[in-house]
Image (cartoon, helix red, strand yellow):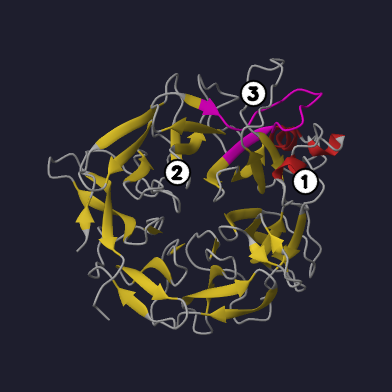
Amino acid sequence: MPQQITTASHGHVLTNAAVWSADSRWIVYDTRSSVDGSVFDGTRIERVEVGTGRVEVLYESTSGACCGVATASPVDSRVVFIHGPEQPTADWSYAAWHRRGVVVDAARPGIATTLDARTLVPPFTPGALRGGSHVHLFSSDGKLVHFTYEDALLAAAEQAGTAAEKNLRGVGVSVCDEAVTVPRTHPRNHSGTAFSVLVTTLTDTPRPGSDQISRACEEAWVGTAGYRRADGTQQRYALACQGTVVTADGRTIAEAFLIDLPNDPRRLVQPASVALAGTPTTRPAPPPGVSQRRLTFTSQRRHPGLNGPRHWLRSSPDGSQIAMLMKDDAGVVQLFTISPLGGEPRQVTRNPWSVASAFSWSPDGRSIAAIADGSVMRIDVASGLTHRLTEAVHDDTAPRPEACVFSPNGTSIAYVRTMPDPRGTGRHNQIFTTPSRSTEP
C-alpha cells in the first residue's frame, strides 16, 4: 500500500538515485519550491525517517546560497549535494559553472565540507576544478564521487569571444580523502577534501559519423564492483553516460558511452601534465589510464538516439547490463539494456505506454522501478513483464518523472507526487513510498 512520508508545507525534491540511507531507514531530499526542481532556491537538506515521518535538518545554507540535489553514501552516513555561491554577486550568481559539491555527515548535522576544490587564477592547481559540479553520486565503496561539470573560465571566455575551446558539459570524478589546497588568489577559489579530475574527452564540433562527443552527462557507476571484461578480468571502476554525437547525415543525437577508470583510484591523483588542470582557454584533460568508448550506434533506427524523459543511465548491480530509454518503431519510449562490452541493445519492455521517468535497479538486479501510465511500475528485466504497484493517476497529482528509487534492502520504492496542502498553502511535492512487490498483474 503506498504511503505518504512527508507532509510539511514546502517542496520535497528527490534526486534520481541514491536517496535512501544505507540501512534503508531514511530518505534524503532538498526543499526546492518548483515541482521539477528547476528553480534552485532550496536552503535545506533534510532527511525523513520512513517508519515514523520524523524529519531531521542535515544542513541549512546561509549568506544567500542555496543547496539541493542530495544523495546518500551506500556505506556510511555521508550525504553529498550541490551548494550554490555564498554572497552571490552579479558576476558570480548561481549557474551550472558556479556551484560545488558539499558533504555533510548525518551523524554531525550542520557541519559541511567542500568536496571539489576550485582554482580560477593561473597557475591552476591540479586536482581542483575551474567551475561547477552537479549531481554527485558516491561509488559503491564510498571512495569516489562522480558528477557533471561546466567550466566558469571557458564560459566567461566564450562570452568575451576569447575562448579557444567551448564550455561543454562533461563528467568528472572526485577521489575522496585526497585533499587539495588552493591559494586564495581569487575570491571564489576554495580548497576541497577530494582530488577532482575530468574523465570525458569532448570536442567542440564533432565530426559527422564519428565517436566524438560535444556533451557528456546523465552518468552512472557500472556495477557495484565494476564489470567483467571480455578477457575475464575485472574492470573495477567505470561510468556509463550519454554522449552527444553527430550522425553521418548531420543529426545531433545522444548515444551511450562507457568510461573506464584505473582500478586503483590513486592513479587519478597524479598530476601528469599541465593539461590535467587546463589553461585559461582550454578544458582540463582526463588523466592517464582513463579511456572512453561508444556503446550504442542507433543512427539507422526509425527513432535514433536515446529518447524519452530526462534519465540517467543505470547499471545492474553485477555490471552486466546498462539500462537506458529509447523509442521503439511506434514511437513509444521503452526500456533497453546493453552490455558494457557493447553489442546490440536488447529491448526489455514492449508496453503500449511510454516509460515516463528516471528509473532505478533493484539490489538483486532482477527488476527496474519506473513511472509509466500514471503509476509506479516494477519491470522484470528478464521477461519485460511490467507490474503496476500503485493505482493509475492521470491528473496533476500523478507520480513525478524525476525519481523512482529502490531502497537498498529492495523492499520499497521512493517517488514524489505534487499534492494540495490541506492547510491551504498551495501545492507541494511530497515523498511517497510503495512496497516493491504486488500481486497486481
Question: Is residue 253 in view from this perspective?
Answer: no
Q: Give the extent of the magenta segment.
A: 113-133
Q: Return the mark for residue 72.
A: 2
Type of residue at label 2?
Ala
Badge count: 3
Q: Element under label 3?
A: loop
Report x, y in % for residue 179. Answer: 66, 27
Residue 323: where, in percent of width, then height? Answer: 54, 68
Query: Residue 90 vs residue 120: left or right?
Result: left
- 3 and 1 marks in contact (CB < 8 Å): no
| Residue indicated by mark 1 | 286
In the rendered view, would you say 133 is above or below 381? above
Q: Earlier in the sequence, mark 3 or mark 2?
A: 2
Taking depth in this image into account, of 63 and 436 the one nearest to the observer is: 436
Which labelled disc corresponds to residue 191?
3
- Taking the view exactly as shown, the residue that stands out farthest to the right is 273
Residue type at numbered disc 3: Ser
Q: Label 1 is placed on what type of residue?
A: Pro
Secondary structure that dominates the magenta span: loop
Q: Is residue 312 left or right of residue 20?
A: right
Image quadrant in which the C terminus is located: bottom left
User: In the image, residue 386 lies at what x, y percent?
Assistant: 36, 78
Quarter of image, res 91: top right
Q: Residues within 10 Å of mark 3 (few under 14, many from 20)?
A: many
Q: Nearer the viewer, residue 352 or 403?
A: 403
Determine the residue positioned at 44% across, 81% down.
Answer: 384
